[in-house]
Image (cartoon, grey):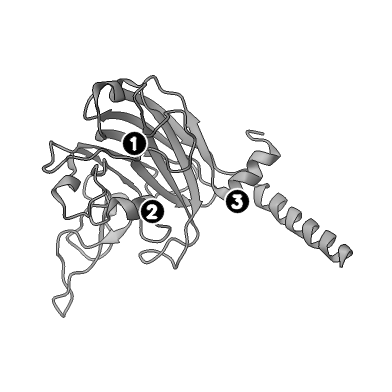
């Protein structure tokens, strides 16, 4: 077994937290159960896996005076299911009989979602890769402009009704891009520049990727990351699917607790 029983139960209750060593940044990932209705208005029946990069003054980024993540080259892969993307209208076309834009595009950089929502929402996110702005600004702020230089597969917008054809049943997804000297960058990304790079706190680090997948799907992120100063961090981080027996064990534990409580009554 990959994990102990104790670890499996912790995963079921709190969401998994994995960590991989890096010569520069520390990369972590978390897994949470989505909620709400089915997409596009919710993520019931899906898991949300978020990937983070963090550094402090002991790293080359911190020593160089970096204040946040600037460039991201990342590939997400899943062998167990397919990725789900947030469906929004990105290009204003096509329109219906009332000249209302049909929301049929996949927002693969969550360009219409601010950083705070991307970090916490269990209902309104989708699979995405990007560097978010340092100041947690909204999508319309100049700080939030993420310039994409590479996208696989291409065609995340669609001129016809329905989702983009290239994104159906997708098991691998890649984005390359950067924040190109955005205007108004003054404050550090406090989530990236944590007090201790060894901190294992949930959600610690700069968010750089989100994977929305069916329950029990494993996701791996291959990454090449750079802050605005310092070295690149290159490697991989895998968030494993919980063992099939995890939820059954948790259920047995609940039943046992109820039985003990009944005997005491």
Instruction: State whether residue 68 appears in this view.
Output: yes
Quarter-of-image position of residue 152: top left
Q: Residues within 10 Å of mark 2 (few under 14, many from 20)?
A: many
Identify which residue is drawn at 29% across, 21% down: 63
Q: Position of residue 172 (x, y in %)?
A: 36, 40
Residue located beneath label 1 in the image: 192
SS for callout 3:
helix
Residue located beneath label 3 in the image: 13
Q: In this picture, is 140 found above or below 29?
A: below
Looking at the picture, tell me which residue is in the foreground, 188 or 26: 188
SS for callout 1:
loop
Q: Residue furthest bottom?
A: 98
Query: Disc 1 and disc 3: Cα gap in Å?
Result: 26 Å
Instruction: State whether residue 85 appears in this view.
Output: no
Q: In this picture, is 200 found above or below 94?
A: above
* Tally of numbered discs: 3
Looking at the picture, tell me which residue is in the foreground, 208 or 187: 187
Q: In the rendered view, does 59 fall on the left or right side of 158?
A: right
Q: Residues within 10 Å of mark 3 (few under 14, many from 20)?
A: few
Give the number of the mark in front: 3 or 2: 3
């Amino acid at each position: 077994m990959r994990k102990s029983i104790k670890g499996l139960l912790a995963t079921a209750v709190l969401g998994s937290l994995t960590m991989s060593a890096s010569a520069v940044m520390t990369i972590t990932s978390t897994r949470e159960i989505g909620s709400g209705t089915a997409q596009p208005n919710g993520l019931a029946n899906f898991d949300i896996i978020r990937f983070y990069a963090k550094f402090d003054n002991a790293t080359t980024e911190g020593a160089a005076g970096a204040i946040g993540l600037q460039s991201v080259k990342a590939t997400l892969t899943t062998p167990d299911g397919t990725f789900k993307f947030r469906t929004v209208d990105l290009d204003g076309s096509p329109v219906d009989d009332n000249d209302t834009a049909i929301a049929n595009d996949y927002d693969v950089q969550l360009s219409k979602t601010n950083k705070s929502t991307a970090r916490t929402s269990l209902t309104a996110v989708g699979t995405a890769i990007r560097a978010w702005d340092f100041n947690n600004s909204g999508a319309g702020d100049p700080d939030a402009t993420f310039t994409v230089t590479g996208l696989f597969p291409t065609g995340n917008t669609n001129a016809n009704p329905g989702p983009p054809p290239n994104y159906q049943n997708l098991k691998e997804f890649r984005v390359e891009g950067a924040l190109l000297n955005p205007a108004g960058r003054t404050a550090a990304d406090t989530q990236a520049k944590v007090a201790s790079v060894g901190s294992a706190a949930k959600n610690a680090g700069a968010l750089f990727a989100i994977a929305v997948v069916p329950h029990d799907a494993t996701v791996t992120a291959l990454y090449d990351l750079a802050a605005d100063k310092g070295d690149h961090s290159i490697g991989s981080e895998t968030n494993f699917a919980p063992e099939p027996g995890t939820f059954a064990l948790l259920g047995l534990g609940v039943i046992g607790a109820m039985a003990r409580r009944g005997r005491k009554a």
